[in-house]
Image: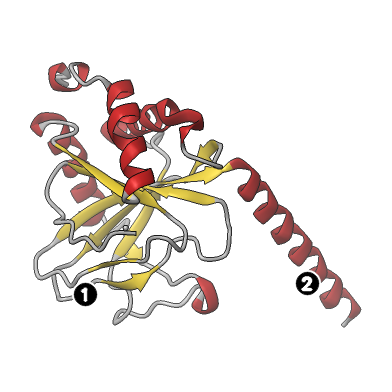
Amino acid sequence: MPLGHIMRLDLEKIALEYIVPCLHEVGFCYLDNFLGEVVGNCVLERVKQLHCNGALRDGQLAGPRAGVSKRHLRGDQITWIGGNEEGCEAISFLLSLIDRLVLYCGSRLGKYYVKERSKAMVACYPGNGTGYVRHVDNPNGDGRCITWKSFVADVEPIFDRLLFFWSDRRNPHEVQPSYATRYAMTVWYFDAEERAEAKKKFRNLTRKTESALTED
């Protein structure tokens, strides 16, 4: 796999001189030609294979409609990839690069201290006019702090574009209707303290639910 383009990238400089200032000043930023054509195509071809093999399922809504599929609200088909799956070496490599960028941002992300992230959500918008209506990734404090706008922006979904933005209520966003097949991959980075609190609340809620069922 030719890595000349990527090896020339100064990830620490990109993180400190571009990503951090942009997140603080405007709430988002993006990097074009991040992987380069060859490596980018390796990722894209694997995503297409997942789609063709039937690995993608209708995306579900979170919040009050959790677990519900409403195509007029959210029309993507998705699967989750950790990077260790067979044939997903290029995806794993991409995730490692993004991890390094976030690591270099370090303590410069304000109150956030990032220790973990989600798996990668691989998504396909099948080109039938579906999108994803305006929403916030983390409206209830589940720990997600960075998604991979304060400003109103129209960011075109072009090949090999890497987008960062805050996941909380500062950045409601949407995926506009797509009329051609479109693929995307998303990961979320978690603030350690907020994530721990969210897990604690979930455990307490689970215990209360189990207790109520036992009493019935």
Q: Position of residue 50 (x, y in %)?
A: 26, 50
Pointer 1 residue: 130
Q: What amino acid is labelled 2 in the image? A: Thr
Seen in the picture, residue 116 relative to 199 is either above or below; the reply is above
Estimate the spatial distance between the alpha carbons at disc 1 and disc 2, rounded to whole Å: 36 Å
Q: Position of residue 39 (x, y in %)?
A: 16, 30
Seen in the picture, residue 191 relative to 107 is either above or below; the reply is below
Quarter holding the N terminus is top left
Q: Is residue 49 left or right of residue 194?
A: left
Which residue ends up furthest to the front in the rendered image? 25
Residue located at (65% from left, 44% from top): 193
Q: Nearer the viewer, residue 117 or 215?
A: 117
Q: What amino acid is labelled 1 in the image? A: Thr
Q: Is residue 101 left or right of residue 140?
A: left
Pointer 2 residue: 209
Pointer 1 or 2: first along the chain: 1
